[in-house]
Image (spheres, rainbow, N blue to C red):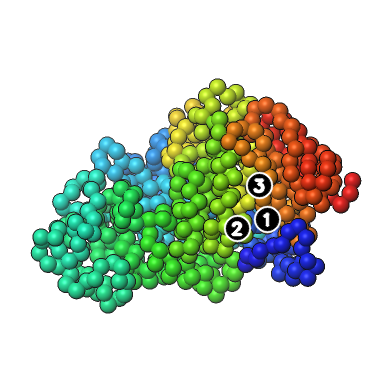
Amino acid sequence: MFRPLSNPAMTRDSSIRFWKFLRFPLLAGLLLGPAAQAASYRDRLAQDEIIYFLLPDRFENGDRSNDRGGLTGGRLITGFDPTDAGFYHGGDLKGLRARLDYIQRLGATAIWVGPIFRNKPVQGPPGNESAGYHGYWITDFTHVDPHLGTDGDFKALVEAAHARGLKVYMDIVVNHTADVIRYRDCPTSGCAYRSRADYPYTREGGPDGEPINPGFLGDQVQTTANFAKLASPIYAYRVYVPEAERHLKVPDWLNNPIYYHNRGNSTFTGESSTMGDFMGLDDLMTEHPRVVQGFIEIFGGWIDRFGIDGFRIDTERHVNPEFWRAFVPAMLRRAKARGIPNFTIFGEVSSPVIDVAQQAGHTRIDGMPLVLDFSFRAAVLQALAGQGGSDGLDLLFKGDPLYQGGAPATLAMPTFVSNHDLGRFAHFVRLGLPQASDDEVLKRVTLAHAMLFGLRGVPTIYSGDEQGFAGNGGDRAAREDMFASQVASYNATRLVDTDRTTAQSSFDPRHPLYREITTLAALRRSHAALRRGRQIVRAASDKPGLFAVSRFDPVDGHEILLAFNTSAEPLAANVEVDARSAHFRSFAGTCPSAATAPGSLAVSIPPLSYIFCEAVASR
Ligand SMILES: [Ca+2]
Ligand SMILES: [Ca+2]
Ligand SMILES: [Ca+2]
């Protein structure tokens, strides 16, 4: 769907083609608001979305009768303990459905729902157990976890979202299942990785062991005939499935250890990155044609049954490229056949630092249509959560042509500043600038969201950021409840710009960050340049100060200058603009009304603030 746009002087012919290409329902949706959007959500392109991401267990409790997932007993059986950050808290799909209005009023157009599949309720060594409240420990890939509701609840949620024109993205996992498979020669979960060289497939327990799997040519020969020769899974470890869990996984083929790597824990380096167990979670043999076919059936089934709009793919980088090369086109075909032309797939390629090469590599080698832009988060943190500069953002955007599809493809890439694994933006501001006042933290979080909504990519809001949630770390420390929380550590953490705490329900549309995001979302909706426009960096520095980009309207090519002051001091500077952009109007902050000379705009920006300036034909 991407095509390069000539800017700023687009020819009349290409402009007409572009309008035809847009199609009427989309325009109607953008111009007329939610009612018209409902009719056209299937036509909306991925780059026009604003994503709201949430974990359903932590969002809203709409049904107290399912809090224990239909299980009886203590928390180590049911997984339910609303006072412990590592257990189920009671949120569910009914609760989420009841809060769709809150999400839509914020300006979001798509909801990324954390995994909803049935999980192993509790896992972990004695004394260190926790629950599958996050959804990433799947045992049944074909049904909703009873803690979150029923398949019917999910259907009702998707239908209610679609009736409002909201899309629903499912969070899916193919890298691993829950931790069920055990190794006799390693009774704990801390089993070292055993490589293909040290433990070849064709010998039991090392090169000197008994011959097994005669004729198997290894996992790189990914044919049914070759994998038919892989009959024994005990090349690295002596694997077994505990008797009580022999048929725990659904579909049933997932219970056969032959479909797993069984080489011990990943060290997240070398071959273990794709073949090791993610902290004991059973790592699937995704090279095996049966596994490929099995997951195409499983997730194709969700598309058929529920008509969802996309997948966010967990641990994407830990699965071999050949799997994605088969899976992704199969899902897009399946969706198209179901009447979903713009099915959106984005993979998690996690990185704490700016790493465009790796992210882009997964779009080129795996054929992953989009990846979550972890590098964007790292660059914004560098610019706003310490004493660093905006040169990381410059570096990030210089890498955009590396993606499959080039820079235009990055318009649809989900960007974010907070998430459920690495932690929330406000936490890192407090960490990096311990002397910062509450007001300064608010300004920095606000500025980060202005970047999220103004710069290229699809803004992805992590639930709770709009209520000033800060968390005090990553993982479970950043997974606070939106409904009234009973977790002492959550309730003791100061929120940004409110005296409320997470002990109260947090769906407050008056929160300054909720209002700010609503405003930013409206700007994005009303300016195609922010959704679809080419972007060029105008100013960046290795120190706090001016960061500026221009974006260009995809239809008539007119310019919008976005200028950010990442320093705590007022700023005045000349910024280069297009020589044809003579006059400007402000649509955020205060802009000069005219260029000082052709190609130069003199801007003044208050500390930690931003201005968005749109070129207009005349004053
Ligand atoms: Ca519940
Ligand atoms: Ca395991
Ligand atoms: Ca893997």
Q: Upstream in the sequence, badge 2 or badge 3?
A: 2
Q: Position of residue 581 (x, y in %)?
A: 81, 49
Q: Residue at x 10, y 64 (%)?
A: 210
Q: Nearer the viewer, residue 53 or 292?
A: 292
Circle 3 residue: 537
Q: Position of residue 75 (x, y in %)?
A: 34, 41
On-image quarter of the N terminus: bottom right
Query: Badge 3 local density, few (<14 within 10 Å), some, or many (20+)?
Result: some
Which is more foreground, mark 1 or mark 3?
3
Q: Residues within 10 Å of mark 2 (few under 14, many from 20)?
A: many
Q: Is residue 252 in view?
A: no
Amino acid beneath label 2: Ala
| Front residue (pair 231, 213) | 213
Q: Secondary structure at mark 1?
A: loop
Q: Quadrant of residue 468?
A: top right
Image quadrant in which you'd find residue 197:
bottom left
Camera-side residue: 508 or 68?
Answer: 508
Would residue 46 be found to the left or right of residue 68 on screen? right
Residue 541 image offset from top left, x and y in percent: 61, 37
Residue beneath label 1, please?
Answer: 534
Which amino acid is tagged 3? Val
Q: Is residue 370 visible?
A: yes
User: Mark 1 belongs to which amino acid?
Assistant: Arg
Q: Nearer the viewer, residue 525 or 403?
A: 403
Q: Residues within 10 Å of mark 1 (few under 14, many from 20)?
A: many
Q: Alpha carbon of mark 1 to alpha carbon of mark 3: how far?
A: 10 Å
Q: According to the image, label 2 marks what residue? A: 407
Which residue shows up at 36% across the image and 52% down it? 137
Mark 1 Cβ inside 8 Å of ligand 3: no
Q: Earlier in the sequence, mark 2 or mark 1?
A: 2
